Image (tube, helix red, strand yellow):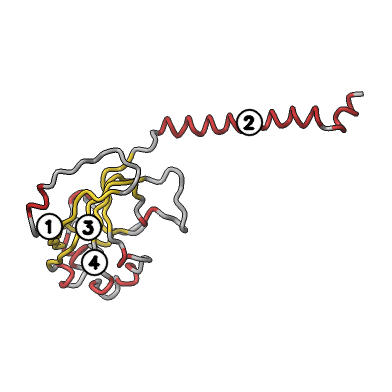
Amino acid sequence: MAYYGELNVFIAAEIEWGAIDPTALDQVIHRGEEKETRLLAEFDINLTLTKRRLTSIGPYYTDGATINGGRLEDNAFILRTFHVRLEKGSFIPITNICDGKVYQFTKRYALRLAFDKTPFPPSAVWKRGWQPWTRDPGIDDWTALYVEPIELVTDMEIWNWYKDSYEAKRQKAERLERVNGTDNPTDSAKSD
C-alpha cells in the first residue's frame, strides 16, 4: 500500500491480509462484457499494515521504519477487519477527478475492490507533524482499490483522433467560408 502526494511518498508499506472465510476465495466469477457495475464477490478480510517497505517504489526510501513507522503511530499497524466487495464495471479513482471533472483520457479500471471503510491509515493514526500532510480531502473516505486498467486508446489512436479532429474542424471551417462567401450579399456585390 502506498500513499503519496505530488512530490512525497508518505507511506510505502507491505500489507498482510487473509480472508476470514477462505471458501469465499473459491467463488468462480464470470467477467462478462456488461456495461453496468456488477457485484462479482463479497467477503470479509483481515488486513494488517506492516512497517516493511514496499520494494516496488525503488531505492529512494530504503528504511521502512523511517517512512512507515516514522510517520504513523503504532496503532496504525494493528489487525483490522473489512467487508469487501469485488465489482466489475468502469471505474475512475477519486484521485483522478480534478476539480469535479473527469477528462477524456482519464485512466479507467475494470475491477474495483470496495471496502466498507478506508484501508488507508486514518488521519488519527498519523504522527504529529505528518498530519497536515495527510489532510487530503476525503482520505478517510478512500474506500476502494482499483485493478486491471481498461485500455481506452493507444498513443497512435490518440494521435489519429487529434489529427482527424483537427482535419474535420479545418474542413468544416472551409465549408462555412464557401457557404458564407456565396450567400453573403456583400461578397456578390464586390464581384459585380
Q: CA distance from mark 3 to mark 1?
A: 16 Å
The amino acid type of the residue labelled 4 equals Pro
Q: CA distance from mark 3 to mark 2?
A: 49 Å
The first of marks 3 and 2 along the sequence is: 3
Secondary element type, mark 1 = strand
Judged from this view, the residue extending furthest toward the right is: 192
Seen in the image, is 27 located left or right of residue 166?
Answer: left
Q: What residue is at 34 percent from the left and 38 percent from the top?
A: 151
The amino acid type of the residue labelled 2 equals Arg
The first of marks 3 and 4 along the sequence is: 3
Q: Position of residue 123 (x, y in %)?
A: 28, 71
**Residue hosting label 1:** 17
**Residue hosting label 4:** 121
> Quick check: can you spot residue 50?
no
Q: Nearer the viewer, mark 3 or mark 2?
A: 2
What mark, if any, has residue 170 been given in the picture?
A: 2
- What is the crowding at mark 3: few (fewer than 14 residues within 10 Å), some, or many (at least 20)? many
Q: Position of residue 143 (x, y in %)?
A: 28, 61
Seen in the image, is 172 located left or right of residue 100?
Answer: right
**Residue hosting label 3:** 12
